[in-house]
């Protein structure tokens, strides 16, 4: 397990988080210290794709090392997948699938479209990977999906899209909601899914019927206030 960081001017750094070598324990500790510092630094803006899954993976990796770390400690880290969905909420490519290859396909399709739309220099590179998945003809390139080089290109693409997507959100008056509502929720959901949430089935069953009745009432009320028109 590792993390690829892409900085300004396309400088790319790969941080190995989990290795089997005991000799690299000191290196792993320093890598983790650097990563945690970056994630928690309010003065450094960060962007990624599908932040919740990555936070859960990092938390699991941290736990495997016998250390404690919470997703809530992350600051100024933005999920461009959510930004894309807010700009174009009807895009089905942004929904999850149970199949890993389908998710890779959807991610590549979305990033490719965004790269072309915002003139990313990497749109040509992403088109090559996308064509490999679609055709299935070039096994060597298909095998490159998920490799370090592929991941570095994806990281660079996300860096390219960070500024334009922020600008688009601002133009659509969505930036405040993205920063103050959507982004904090991701960290909370990642933490909830990692540690679990207590659930009392008795309380749930007791509250279900009143809630259903309340929902029906509110639906009918909204329908009447809308003039009786259905949408």
Image: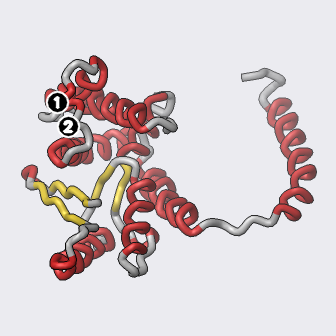
Decide if residue 27 is on the left or right side of residue 92.
left
Measured Cα–Cα span from mark 1 to mark 2: 7 Å
Q: Secondary structure at mark 1?
A: helix
- Location of residue 212 by image quarter: top right
x, y percentage for residue 99?
A: 46, 35
Decide if residue 193 is on the left or right side of residue 161.
right
Q: What colour scheme governs how the chains and residues are painted in the rendered image of this protein?
A: secondary structure
How many marks overall? 2
Instruction: Please give the name of the residue rendered at 75% of the width and 65% of the height, measured from the top-left corner.
Output: 199
Q: Nearer the viewer, residue 8 or 198?
A: 198
Q: Nearer the viewer, residue 24 or 16?
A: 24
- Whether residues under marks 1 and 2 lie with C-beta atoms below 8 angstroms apart, the answer is yes
Residue 140, label in figure: 1
- Location of residue 38 by image quarter: bottom left
Label 1: few (<14), some or many (≥20) within 10 Å?
A: few
x, y percentage for residue 49?
A: 35, 47
x, y percentage for residue 159?
A: 21, 48
Q: Which residue is mark 2?
A: 144
């Amino acid at each position: 397990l590792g993390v690829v960081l892409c900085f300004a001017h396309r400088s790319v750094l790969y941080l190995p988080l989990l290795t089997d070598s005991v000799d690299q324990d000191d290196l792993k500790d320093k890598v983790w210290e650097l990563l945690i510092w970056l994630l928690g630094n309010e003065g450094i803006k960060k962007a990624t794709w599908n932040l919740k899954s990555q936070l859960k993976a990092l938390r699991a990796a941290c736990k495997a090392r016998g250390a404690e770390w919470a997703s809530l400690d992350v600051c100024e880290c933005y999920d461009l997948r959510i930004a894309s969905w807010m700009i174009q909420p009807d895009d089905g490519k942004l929904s999850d699938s149970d199949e890993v290859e389908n998710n890779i396909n959807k991610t590549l399709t979305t990033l490719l479209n965004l790269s072309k739309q915002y003139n990313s220099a990497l749109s040509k590179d992403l088109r090559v990977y996308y064509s490999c998945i679609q055709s299935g003809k070039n096994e060597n390139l298909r095998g490159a999906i998920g490799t370090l080089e592929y991941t570095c290109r994806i990281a660079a693409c996300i860096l390219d899209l960070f500024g334009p997507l922020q600008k688009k959100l601002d133009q659509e008056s969505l930036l405040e909601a993205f920063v103050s509502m959507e982004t904090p929720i991701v960290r909370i959901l990642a933490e909830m899914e990692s540690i679990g949430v207590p659930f009392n089935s008795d309380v749930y069953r007791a509250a279900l019927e009143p809630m259903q009745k309340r929902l029906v009432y509110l639906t009918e009320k909204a329908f009447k206030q809308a003039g009786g028109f259905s949408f």
